[in-house]
Image: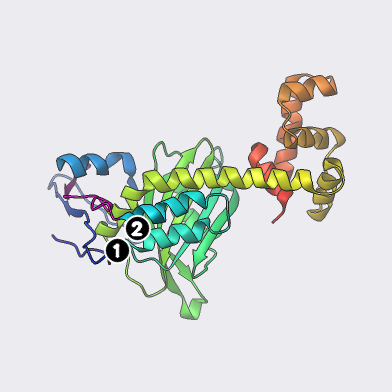
Amino acid sequence: MPLFAPRAKWGGAPVPVFCYRRRMDPSVEYAESSAVSAVTLSEVNVRAALMHGQSQGGLEMKSTRSPNANHDPRFYQELGQLVSSTGSSSFAGQMLQLVDTLVSVQGIVLCEWALDAAQSGVERVTRLGGAGVQHDICASETLQQSLLQSIVHMDASLLVQTRVPVGQKSARRDIQVCSLVSSSSELRRIICFYRLAGSKAFSLTELSLLKSLSDTLLPLVEHHSQLLVQSAAEKIESEPGSIDEAFSGRLAQDAITLSAREQEVCIGLLTGGSVAEMARRLNVKNSSVETYLKRATAKLGVSGRHSLARWMAGP
């Protein structure tokens, strides 16, 4: 069944799209969820489908060109601007501008989740940026519950489509959300594209376009996150007074109490020290340093050097 193509803004030339047609197997029961659907990107090799017209994962793909196959120079200009904006406050806006030329979206939120896999829960949510019409999508319990089952034990990047209710009960409406998710250990970096209440859901054509961009966008979000951590660390180092004073002030701000040893290992971590170096400095075993770190990060609600630096930089 043919699908309508998303709007094109480049040069008047039509933006090529994928057309999906589901092959129905009478021996298989198909279930459609109105709340959330997830597609493993590795199951649908978009590039191979473009080149060879392959059918994979029960979806028959018909396509002739990728979104940038007409080599429109403005696409590469937009992409170059996005790459150069990593680590800056304009990064999310540049990504929204790039994607909105292919798929109509009203907003974007970038976030990083630290998971507690043992408890199958979200330990921490860090917002990495946002643009367009703003909604606090990352902190939404509905989104977390919808995504969690799919992303806790993921071993490949995912595309997840869901609906997030907003507003008061008497006037509640759904925002259509398409999330691209990457995995790195216990971290999940998420790009949420969304449409305002009352808008139509993302079509298969539009989802396929977003999937085709994910190999570029998700690594850029990871790089953006790393640059934010570096910037936070530099901010800490440039602040007047010692790192000890800055750390103590941050603890007081959040009304958190750490033992002297726990503070020492946190400060050591913030200043680039390794576990072995801190163990030698404190004249304790490596395992003792790891125990202090584990206790301290649990109290702070962070995990690792990067998230500790973000915590130090403040809300």
Q: Is residue 289 above or below residue 90?
A: above
- Whether 59 is among the magenta residues is yes
Q: Please give the name of the residue rendered at 42% of the width and 48% of the height, measured from the top-left corner.
A: 217
For numbered disc 1, what is the local secondary structure? loop
The residue lying toward the viewer, choosing from 121 and 266, is 266
Which image quarter is the N terminus in?
bottom left
Q: Amino acid at mark 1?
A: Trp
Q: Is residue 240 visible?
A: yes
Q: SS of the residue at dot 2?
A: helix
Q: Position of residue 289 (x, y in %)?
A: 76, 26
64 or 113: nearer the viewer = 64
Q: Please identify the quadrant where the C terminus is shown.
A: bottom right
Marks 2 and 1 sit apart, C-alpha to C-alpha, by 7 Å
* Residue in view at x 42 percent, y 64 percent: 194
Magenta stretch secondary structure, dominant: loop
Q: Which residues are magenta?
A: 57-72
Amino acid bearing label 2: Arg
Q: Which numbered circle lies on residue 207?
A: none
Query: Left or right: 233 with respect to 8?
Result: right
